[in-house]
């Protein structure tokens, strides 16, 4: 398979596993406003439930106005860790969500800061869970670097490549090329 075919297979496998960005955007219209994050994003299949639950909690927490201002800039995995980058701005200045590295803070109002801290706590808790969850199968795991690439993996998938994993998913569902 060439690169384009591999990417298409990856997308198909993600959709089968219910973790495509399209599916996430559709599940949380108040948070994503019908648009994929601006920066290239993905959710690892083994982390699907953790990420969905985090957005469910954020959705429950935010008022209409706060949700309208929230922007999800990127969701990705880096060095085996889940990263979710958020931003948002209030024209009134009442609530301002400012993305700062992996941290989010709201200001200048007290209520804004409290909500921002709570959103950040949800994201931090999700990232902590992901660090102990195989990003392929969702079983307990830990962050390791078998081939100099950090990834949260269980023993069984310690050395599995994403190409191998996706091909197995597609074969199981009769969608293999
Ligand atoms: Zn695994």
Image (tube, rainbow, N blue to C red):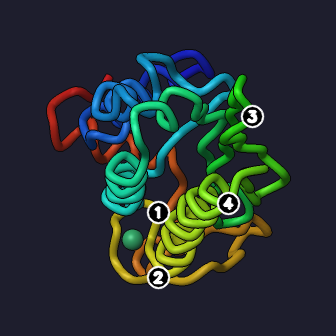
Check disc 3: other Cα within 10 Å, few if <14, some if 14-19, many if 20+: few
Percent across and percent down for residue 160 are: 50, 62
What residue sits 48% from the left and 46% below the top? Answer: 43
As drawn, is 114 to the left or to the right of 169? right
> Dot 4 lies on which element?
helix
Q: Which mark is residue 135?
A: 1
Q: Which mark is residue 110?
A: 4
Query: Can you say which quadrant of the picture contains the C terminus?
Result: top left
User: Label 2: which residue?
Assistant: 141
Which comes before the other along the chain, label 4 or label 3?
3
Figure quadrant of residue 87:
top right
Q: Calculate the distance from the C-alpha at mark 4 to the C-alpha at mark 3.
A: 12 Å
Picture mark count: 4
What residue sits 36% from the left and 57% below the top? Answer: 57
Check disc 4: other Cα within 10 Å, few if <14, some if 14-19, many if 20+: few
Q: Calculate the distance from the C-alpha at mark 3 to the C-alpha at mark 2.
A: 42 Å
> Dot 3 lies on which element?
loop
Q: Is mark 1 within 8 Å of ligand 1?
A: yes
């Amino acid at each position: 398979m060439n690169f384009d075919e591999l990417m298409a297979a990856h997308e198909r496998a993600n959709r089968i596993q219910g973790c495509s960005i399209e599916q996430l955007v559709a599940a949380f219209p108040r948070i994503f406003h019908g648009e994929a994050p601006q920066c290239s994003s993905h959710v690892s299949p083994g982390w699907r439930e953790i990420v969905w639950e985090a957005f469910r909690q954020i959705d429950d927490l935010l008022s209409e106005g706060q949700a309208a201002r929230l922007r999800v800039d990127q969701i990705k995995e880096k060095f085996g860790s889940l990263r979710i980058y958020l931003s948002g701005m209030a024209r009134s200045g009442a609530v301002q969500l400012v993305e700062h590295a992996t941290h989010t803070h709201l200001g200048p109002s007290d209520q804004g800061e409290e909500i921002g801290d709570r959103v950040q706590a949800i994201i931090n808790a999700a990232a902590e869970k992901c660090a102990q969850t195989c990003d392929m199968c969702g079983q307990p795991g830990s962050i390791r670097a078998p081939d100099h690439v950090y990834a949260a993996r269980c023993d069984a998938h310690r050395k599995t490549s994403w190409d191998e994993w996706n091909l197995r998913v597609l074969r199981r569902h009769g969608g293999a090329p």
